[in-house]
Amino acid sequence: MKEIKARPLDENNKEGKMTSYIFFFQPFFALAMAIFIISFNKEVFKNNLAAQLFMGVFFLLVISSFFTNMPYIANGVFAEEVCYVKNKVFYYTKTRNFLGTKKIIKSFEIPIREINDVKENEKKLRVTMFSIFKPRNSVVIETRDGIKYAIMNDFRLGSKNDTNTETRQERAKRIFNEVKELITEAKNENTFNI
């Protein structure tokens, strides 16, 4: 049984994990810093409109980070996706290993005969300051019922000692080809093993 895994962080990538945790907890650090600054300079913030405006924009950026980067990191960077075919059924599981707790985020199984098409996700990803860690699934599986499953995150966070020079597009293409080959082999496999 061939198993395909997609993991943005390798298990021994300490630099990548540390970077992810810093970005994940960055809004909390920023809020603590803002409260610290305000508590020492209360008079400045009471009378100065520019300081109030600056803190308003600062708080807006922190709040937007709560709703963008944090979910992307928790559900994308710390996730591991595994798919395989067993007994003519395609199995997929996405688990999150965050702060030592492993949790299943998404899991499904599809009979191979129900899979109508396997496509590469052609959606381009625009990187902004709030989407640095945004995951993009590289494979779209469509069933006979018209249900689409987007799977296999192509994001990868390397380390300073990393020898893998694969770009995000190359990684997405490789993952897509592996999943398509896995499903095609299962569809073409002889059901009568003598």
Image (tube, rainbow, N blue to C red):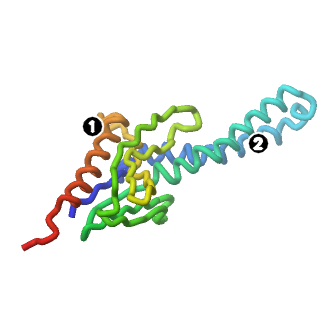
**Above or below — where is 79 with respect to 51?**
below
Could you tell me which residue is drawn at 60 percent across and 48 percent down? 25
142 vs 155, nearest the viewer: 142
Q: How crowded is mark 2: few (under 14 residues within 10 Å), some or many (20 or more)?
A: few
Residue at the farthest top position: 50
141 vs 93, nearest the viewer: 141
**Image quarter hosting the C terminus:** bottom left
Q: 22 left or right of 117?
A: right
90 vs 34, nearest the viewer: 90
Identify which amino acid the numbered label 2 is placed on.
Phe
Q: 108 left or right of 61?
A: left
Mark 2 in CB contact with mark 1 (< 8 angstroms): no
The tag earlier along the polypeptide, 2 or 1, is 2
Residue 9, numbered label: none
Residue at the farthest right position: 47
Could you tell me which residue is drawn at 93 percent across and 30 percent down? 47
According to the image, label 1 marks what residue? 163
According to the image, label 2 marks what residue? 36
Element carrying mark 2: helix
Element carrying mark 1: loop
> In terms of image quadrants, where is residue 4?
bottom left
Q: 1 left or right of 109?
A: left
Q: Nearer the viewer, mark 2 or mark 1?
A: 1
Image location (x, y in percent) of residue 174: 28, 42
Q: 54 left or right of 190?
A: right
**Image quarter hosting the N terminus:** bottom left
Residue at the farthest left position: 194
Q: Can residue 14 be seen in this view?
A: no
**Above or below — where is 38 with respect to 97?**
above
Image location (x, y in percent) of residue 168: 37, 36
